[in-house]
Structure formats: C-alpha cells, structure tokens
Image: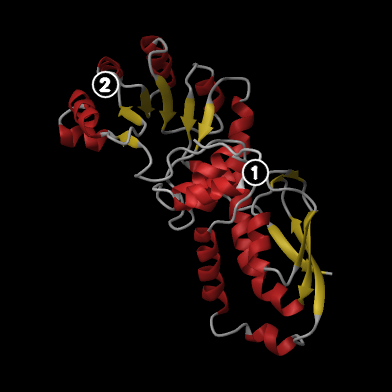
Amino acid sequence: MILAGAKGIEPLIEVLETSVIPFNYAPRVYLLYYNRPMISNSIKRIIKISLEEDIGSGDWTTIWLIPEKQTSQARIVAKDKGIIAGLEVAKEIFGPSVKFTELVKDGAKVQKNQTVAVVEGPTRLILSCERTVLNFMQRMSGIASQTYEFVKLTQATKAVILDTRKTMPGLRELDKWAVRLGGAQNHRFGLYDMILVKDNHIQAVGGISKAMQVLTQNNNNKLEVEIEVDNLEQLKEAINAGAKKILLDNFSLENIKKAVNLNNSRAVLEVSGGVTLENVANIAKTGVDYISVGSLTHSVKAMDLSIEIN
C-alpha cells in the first residue's frame, strides 16, 4: 500500500486510478485507509444515471411553476437520530451552482430534526435534485446507522465488524463507503480482490486440501486467501492445509467457542451467518477476529431525511 507523503493525497489517487488495480478497487482502497471523502468517476456515473432516470425529458412541475432566475435557501433535515452519511454525494449531485454548507460531517451522530446542511442556489435546481439527493443520503445514512449499532456492541472486544458483497447492484461503492462511516471495515469489494473459497468451491474442486493445493499453484498475484468451513472437522482440515484465514459459516455460539480453542491462534477467524444485534456481543466475546454482517447492506432501513425550502 502506498501512503501519502508530504505532497498530500492527490498523487495517491492518480496512482490508484492509473494502476493495474481494477477501477472500482481504487476507491475501495482509498476509503479503507483514509477518512477524507472521494467522489470517484464511478460514483459520478451513478449520479448521472440517477438524475437522468428521475428528470427524463424535464421536471415540468418545477419548470412551469418556478421562474428560471429564482433562488432559494433550503435545509437538509434528519428526521431520525443516527449516523449521517452521503453529504459529499449530495454536494456532488447539486453541483457547483449550489452553495452547499455542511453543518456536520459525514459519519457524525445526529439527532431527530437536526439540520445537517444548508443549500443555496437556483430553486429549480434544488427541487429537481431533491429526490435523488434524499435517495442516496437516506440509504447511506441507514447503512451507517445500522453499522454503528453493531460496532458499538463489540467495542470492548478485539472483533472487527465487516460488511459483505450483499449490496445493491451498482451501488456497492456507496454502500461500502457508508459502512466505513458507521465505524466498521470493508470485506472484499468484489470477486477480483481476494480469494474466498466457499462451500460450493470446495464441493466442486474435491475438498479443502485440494483447493489449497490448487490455489498455491495459481495465486501468482498473492491475493489474500480465506477458506469457508461449515463444521469443526472442516476447520481442522483447513488448519492442517495451512489456511491463514478461516470463515466459520453459520456456527452456533458453542461451536464458535470450540473453534477458537481448536484454532489456538493459528489462523485468523471470521464469523458469518445469522449475526444479529441480539447475539453479536456474545459472538465477539468468544475471541474471534472478524464478524461479517450481511444485514448492514442487504436489509437496510433508510434514515428519514427531508429537504425543506426556507
């Protein structure tokens, strides 16, 4: 990993976006190691598609009701308490013609009815962008808020909360950005940036030991390798085959404890499957290293937000 030096972060962005790393991976790396926001070209494309989908041939309600030169000030208001996310995306959607003043930063805790930003500019532009801004911010804030609840329950342990690839198609970069703002970390971004050997791979190739052998022969890029196991016998096989990172899939709490003892710190252990706010603290206390939670992104409850013209 290249770290930013005295010349700042911009050289790193250039290196990431022009390297052999797949395009979408560059923003993931950036967001993983730096807290500063970044609007990548892929996010800009998503915004463009979203605006085209909503506005189409024209926002005729706004065009016919609002004079072209009219300007207004509006507030973005949180109607729920939680973690705000997506302010940088909102700023990008409104564009340079709108003055966008953040009253809090992405990742901040907000209270119900709190104003999080003020926008000033052409009234038509504000109204035509309103729904697109809210759609992005409500989803991202919902993800960040849900993530924070999981992180809060595991803070007294070494366990790190991770997301999964169970994201909205096309929105993975934004979903995973929101997870980071909620205080958790990102798992692999896609199929290309990490080797995760799941149960179907194991079945198709003929076992864990065979899978490890084949990967040793082919993993020329030295990608991180993780093996998914369904039971304690598979865990033993994975350890004996030299696995350095093992995912315990749908293990009971008692079997997670047995797995930690059996592993004896030989491999990094991740728990996945059936993790909820009710059981995550007990899972974290077993001594596992990571806990991945699909519900952070696949079952998100949007935060209620509104844009109100003053």
| Secondary structure of the residue carrying numbered label 1 | loop
Residue 66: image tag: none
Q: Which residue is mark 1?
A: 7
Q: Nearer the viewer, residue 190 or 53?
A: 190
For badge 2, the amino acid type reads: Gln
In the figure, is residue 301 to the left or right of 248?
A: right
Q: Residue furthest left?
A: 206
Q: Amino acid at mark 1?
A: Lys
- At 26% from the left and 15% from the top, the residue drawn is 240
Left or right of 206? Residue 21 is: right
Give the crowd class for mark 2: few <14, some 14-19, many >=20 residues within 10 Å: some
Q: Is residue 112 above or below residue 276?
A: below
The image quadrant that residue 158 belongs to is: top right
**Does residue 99 appear in the picture of this structure?**
yes
Instruction: Name the residue: 80% across, 52% down.
Output: 103
Can residue 299 be seen here? The reply is no
Q: Position of residue 195 (x, y in %)?
A: 33, 36
Q: Nearer the viewer, mark 2 or mark 1?
A: 1
Residue beneath label 2, please?
234
For the C terminus, the quadrant is bottom right
Distance of mark 2 from mark 1, alpha carbons? 49 Å
Q: Position of residue 110 (x, y in %)?
A: 75, 46
> Most extreme residue toward the front, as rendered?
7
With respect to residue 130, does 63 lie above or below?
below
Give the percent coordinates (x, y) of residue 84: 69, 49
Depicted 199 relative to depicted 255: above or below: below
